[in-house]
Amino acid sequence: MDSPYDAGTDLVVERLFTAGVPVFRFDTREFPGEISVRATLGDGEWAGSLETPHRRVELSDVGAVFWNRPRLFEFPDLSEADAHWARGAARIGFGGVLTSLPVPYLNHPAKASAAEFKPVQLRTAHMSGLSTPRTLITSDSAAVREFAAEIGTPLITKPLGSPYITHSAGTESMYTREVSLETLDGVETTAHLFQERVPKAYEVRLTYIGGTCRAVRIDAGSDISRVDWRADYDSLKYSPIETPAEVAFGVTVYTARLGLEYAAFDFVVRPGGEWVFLEANPSGQWAWLEAQGARIAEYISRTLERWCHL
């Protein structure tokens, strides 16, 4: 289940097709116009089918689910009030059947949703033995100044929610940025995350797939990308890197605690070599790493094939 425009899923489906693994791909936004569901509860399990104008799959034939950021339900022909009601019914009914199948998920959406909270991520990482930066979450500018004085290092701030804001003029990206203690206006409007700025030699995107760690080193080539590498992709250089055993162990414990089979981890590596956890996206994109030899599509397809016992 995913957006039909996801390049990563295209690569996974291609590999599964080559391996002879049957695939039924769809987007939740296609319900109910292009896909229908029939599900009956009997003997404790849901029995029935999903059907499009061209294909049909029995729920009992599903061996594994790859849940990769499917789009939200839409009901363009309904009023706003009716569409809101219909989305709720679709999420609980159609989505409820899809999330209650007795098969492995990569990832189960309920677990992925719970793992999106950055405070949960940081605490879980610390409990899993990973190094974490000193962090403050607050809506109080005085607390920010006290935190800065206490730790004695420069601060950065990053979004707690979506890194994108849509205005009438378009969509704005919100990247990690350095904090000026003289300009903290607006902190009181909502919760904000502040962290020590960890000295970095380079950064790492580590992708965990079903027990395997695939890591890529990211070297920033501009001032803005040294604060947040997503702000200047053209300046970046990539190279495969081995994951230290203690980091791989911590990542494995982290994913087990949160019930994840997939996550995209971001680390800062200090000049002395210590890997410091920043965050872990349970639905992080990865197709852009394939050209760097990460082989993530291969490991995802292998995992799904193994789960299907094929």
Image (tube, rainbow, N blue to C red):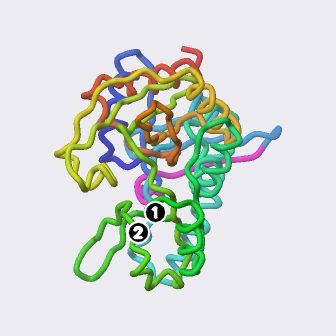
Direction from residue 141 to residue 14 in the image, left or right: left
Residue 245 sits above or below residue 10 on the image: above
Q: Nearer the viewer, residue 64 or 41?
A: 64
Q: Residue at x 50, y 80 (%)?
A: 187
Direction from residue 293 to residue 129 in the image, left or right: right
Q: Are marks 1 and 2 in contact (CB under 8 Å)?
A: yes
Q: Residue under label 1, please give it.
A: 155
* Mark drawn on residue 179: 2
Residue 298 sits above or below residue 219 on the image: above
Could you classify mark 1 by the number of other residues whose Cα lies within 10 Å: few (under 14), some (14-19), or many (20 or more)? Answer: many
Bounds of the magenta span?
A: 29-41
Q: Nearer the viewer, residue 248 or 285?
A: 248
Residue 248 sits above or below residue 224 on the image: above
Toward the right, the furthest residue is: 43
Q: Residue at x 66, y 43 (%)?
A: 126
Q: In which quarter of the view is residue 130 placed?
A: top right
* Amino acid at dot 1: Leu
Residue 193 sits above or below residue 57 on the image: below
Observer able to see residue 158: no
User: Where residue 243 sits in the image (x, y, percent)?
Assistant: 48, 24
Q: CA distance from mark 1 to mark 2?
A: 5 Å
